[in-house]
């Protein structure tokens, strides 16, 4: 089995509603994301012969996802009071609503699924919320 991996990063804020500890407060991270593609055969066409996938294609797809979350406040749908959400929107803050608790684990699965939906044969996605702490989602 062949594997290739690329990475990207983004900065964003989040909080964990209902969590008992520091992460219940609004805070930010420099999220580092690695995406790994797998294949048991290499491509044979003229452009990508001898490759699992063109690195440029997977780098572009991963960066597009990460750029969409860069310098945003990622929050779980229903976790903010309507008036808080309205005030943030009135201040023109960049907000990213997600249907899950914005943990490293859930971000890893979300990014994995989005890359898979783009046609990549995913092995795993790792999301580092600090240099020493990461979550992995894969098949």
Image: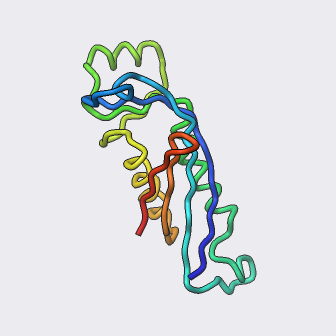
Q: Quadrant of the C terminus?
A: bottom left
Identified at 34% across, 16% down, the residue is 86
- Along the horizontal axis of the image, is 71 left or right of 19? right
How many discs appear?
A: 0
Could you tell whether 14 is left or right of 78 in the image? Answer: right
Question: Which residue lies at the image location 47% right of the left edge and 29% below the top edge?
Answer: 13
**Nearer the observer, 100 or 67:** 100
> At x 71% / y 82%, what residue is drawn?
50
Image quadrant containing the N terminus = bottom right
Q: Is residue 35 left or right of residue 96?
A: right
Q: Position of residue 107 (x, y in %)?
A: 42, 47
Q: How is the image coloured?
A: rainbow
Q: Is residue 92 left or right of residue 78?
A: right
The quadrant holding residue 38 is bottom right
Rendered location of residue 105, percent (x, y): 39, 49
Residue 85, x across and y down, in percent: 33, 20
At x 37%, y 39%, the residue is 102
Quadrant in the picture for residue 112:
bottom left
Residue 73 spot, x, y in % from top left: 45, 28
- Quick one: 75 or 137, which is closer to the camera? 137
Residue farthest right in this picture: 46
Q: Is residue 86 above or below residue 23?
A: above
Q: Is residue 51 above or below residue 116?
A: below
């Amino acid at each position: 089995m062949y594997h290739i991996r690329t990475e990207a990063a983004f900065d964003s804020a989040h909080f964990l509603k209902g969590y008992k500890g520091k992460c219940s407060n609004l805070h930010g991270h420099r999220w580092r994301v690695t995406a790994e593609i797998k294949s048991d055969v290499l491509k044979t066409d003229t452009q990508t012969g001898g490759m699992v996938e063109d690195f440029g294609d997977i780098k572009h797809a991963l960066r597009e996802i990460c750029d969409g979350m860069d310098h945003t406040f990622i929050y779980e749908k229903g976790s903010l009071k309507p008036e808080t959400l309205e005030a943030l929107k009135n201040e023109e803050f960049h907000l990213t609503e997600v249907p899950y608790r914005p943990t490293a684990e859930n971000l890893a699965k979300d990014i994995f699924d989005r890359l898979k939906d783009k046609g990549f044969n995913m092995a795993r996605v790792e999301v580092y919320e600090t240099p020493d702490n990461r979550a992995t989602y894969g098949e």
